[in-house]
Image (cartoon, rainbow, N blue to C red):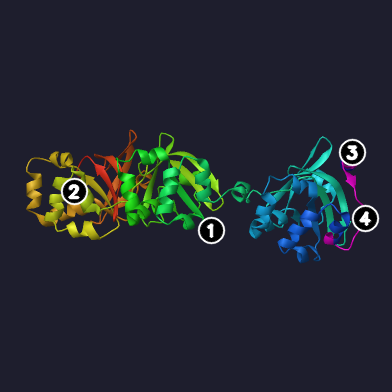
Amino acid sequence: MKKAFVMLLMVVVAGLSFATGVVEYSDPIDTARGAGSFNTLLAAVDAAGLTDTLRGSGPFTIFAPTDAAFAALPAGLVDALLADTDALTAVLLYHVVPRDVRSGEVVSTSGAATLQGETVGFSVRSGAAYADDARVVTADITTSNGTIHAIDSVLVPSSVNVAKLLADDIVDTAVADGRFTTLVTAVQAAGLEATLRGDGPFTVFAPTDAAFAALPAGTVAALLRDIPRLSNILLYHVVGAEVYAADVVELTSATTVQGQPVAITVSGGNVFVNNAQVIITDVQASNGVIHVIDTVILPPADNIAATLQADGRFTTLLTAVQAAGLADTLSTGGPFTLFAPTDAAFARLPVGTVQSLLADIPTLSDILLYHVVEGRVFSGDVVGLSSAPTVQGDSIAISISGGSVRLNADSTVTGVNTLATNGVIHVIDRVILPPGN
């Protein structure tokens, strides 16, 4: 059986549609130079500072793209690689296996680990040997420290983002798109153009011209006259890291360059950043990524107490907070997560309960603090919890019923992720009581 396999392998190797080189040079660099068809590869190796490495003791196997292989790359990619030493080095090292791999192994195994770290795949198709999708055109060129196989395409490891290398920066990408005229104008007016042309990386949640047009009349003109506020809003759309769509759907929030977080939720298969829906994802730029959103998002302007007051549905809660001496805590402390009962929720309590609590400050304070959790717990976090410790000391039970989040089984979360400067508010329809109350 073994003899039959060896004979079959010999037949396969003999039948491959590539030539076999036999000339030996002192090392792979001299070998490639002598061949005359690897000038671009040699220039790239020199630019990456890898010449001495490949002249080393080895053994190495080099899958060497010809000049024609480099010429077949997308326009501008060679220049982009030469301008990005890290990416260039990764690409070149992906062509090098740190041992001697002859053609017999190429056609009989599935791949080999490269110096770059990833594995290059081997296959045979229609009598030709391939490394990934590159066809071996000349095999087994022997050198003093290994073997060269000439290939007809440049190999690119999965870790190298070709689209990013070829892309413009965030500003030029937005300009070329044509749907972000107002955003680009605002960025330039706020003096942020140089920042968004910088190295980054950035993630920009980019409102379209239609999103800006949906703001109240006169808002854009007013912002262009108020540069600090404009800058604050624009930076609230920027995250100081690359966050792709696959990452976004795993997040519940992201901290912006402005300093405040945005809430990220997934509903009905759609992703929302605060109240804005992400309508296009992963627009690649050289220094980051753009996600297109349909609404301008605004950073929180007020603390928890002021946000409750502006809402208008929390008069009883605010009265109780004032009476319990907790107004300053909800104004200046935090960050907190507040499960906020509406006036209607307090009205569901037995007649006279609110008045009794206002006369019993220790019990009132105990109940109010039972609605507060340390830190920002966004809706995406809440649905993954079975309980949460409160500032009062006891935990609240969290469950999912009929698609709704419930606290202690009888209070339903009816509104989520109202952001404040010192925390986040979730609206609930019943007052929750700590054990013993």
First in residue order: circle 4 vs circle 3:
3
Q: With 266 as the anchor, is 302 left or right in this view? A: left
Labels 4, 1: front one? 1
* Percent x, y of residue 3: 90, 42
* Percent x, y of residue 410: 24, 39
Amino acid type at circle 1 is Asp
Q: Residue 309 carries which label?
A: 2
- Magenta region includes residue 21: yes
Indicate the secondary structure of the residue bearing disc 4.
loop
* Percent x, y of residue 110: 75, 45
First in residue order: circle 1 vs circle 2:
1
Is residue 66 something that shows in the picture?
Answer: no
Q: Residue 23 carries which label?
A: 4
Identify residue for label 3: 15
Mark 1 surroundings within 10 Å by alpha-carbon count, few (fewer than 14), some (14 through 19), many (20 or more)? few
Q: Give the range drawn in magenta.
A: 9-29
